[in-house]
Amino acid sequence: MVELETRELEYFIAVADELHFGRAAARLSIAQPALSKAIQRTESRLGVPLFVRSSRHVSLTPAGEALQEHGRHALNAVSAAVRSARRAGDTQAHLRLVLKPGGDANLLSGMLAEYSHQPDARRVDILFSSPSGGAGFLRDGRADLGLLYAPFEDLDGLAHETLHVEDRVVIVPSGHRLAGRASVLLSDLDGEVLPRWKGTPGGDGTGPEVADVVQMLHLITVSRLIGVLPRSLVEPVQAGLVCIPVSDAPPSRLVLAWNEQDRRPLVASFVAAALKLPQGD
């Protein structure tokens, strides 16, 4: 079986990202001839070309594109494994919980209070992510647990427990055509301007880019767009805005998630404490 060393993957990923041997060598702090030879050895071991080279241009072959995708995941997995091993051996390590700003459905205080009664409770450090970036913190080991909103975040590879289920609402200015409605359908929003969430590729929004809920609400107030969110993210509703239930939108679930390979007792202890809280519906 052909195996590549971590350093060989790092070299390959650098060239694949830069598509330039000189820039990749500078990024890696090695000489360009040494990098070129390392890539040639990797291609020889794999038995396939990874790059198409010319005097002016470097591009990936189909084999190179496949290795870039899977190789990056492999490097991330190795880095996460190293961090997890170090933390597992640190009996004083803090527990790290990631969430988006305001994205706790008002459960965080009770959760931390319940966890503090656990005999093995550690200090909990709170980290903040982009609107849909919390799962990445868990996959690469930057956080131990996360409060994530499903179905907006990809839970693949993550274990999770649902803590709260709620409806989704559309937020509009008080003078908007829908402001007087008791409820709306998704089809009622056709033609409206919705935000593009920063760091979220493939989003449906066509309006201004926003990084968080605060920015979005400000733009709604000045009638630049409207937004659809889980209800808890916009309550209490600020003056000048109206929230209307979207009756045919799938419900939103706030889940407590962690890497499915992480079976450390300190993680299980926090999960057990969180599940003692009343479940929202």
Image: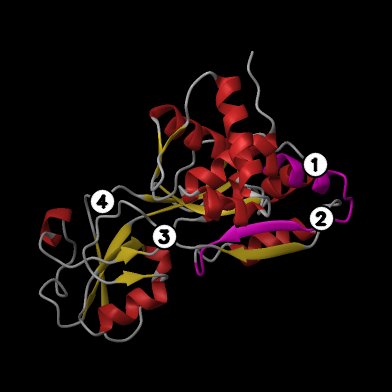
User: Which kind of residue does numbered mark 4 sit on?
Assistant: Ala
Report how far apart the C-alphas of labels 4 and 3 lie in the structure: 23 Å
**SS for tag 4?**
loop
User: Which kind of residue does numbered mark 3 sit on?
Assistant: Gly
Q: Nearer the viewer, residue 266 or 246?
A: 266
**SS for tag 1?**
helix
Q: Residues within 10 Å of mark 2 (few under 14, many from 20)?
A: some
Report how far apart the C-alphas of labels 2 and 3 lie in the structure: 33 Å
Colour scheme shown:
secondary structure
**Counting residues from the N terminus, which is met first, the one under dot 4 or under dot 2?**
2
Task: Identify residue for label 3.
Answer: 199
Q: Residues within 10 Å of mark 4 (few under 14, many from 20)?
A: some
**Counting residues from the N terminus, which is met first, the one under dot 3 or under dot 1?**
1
Task: Identify residue for label 4.
Answer: 249
Magenta residue span: 80-102
Q: Position of residue 243 (x, y in %)?
A: 27, 71
Task: Identify residue for label 2.
Answer: 121
The answer to whether residue 73 is left or right of residue 5 is left
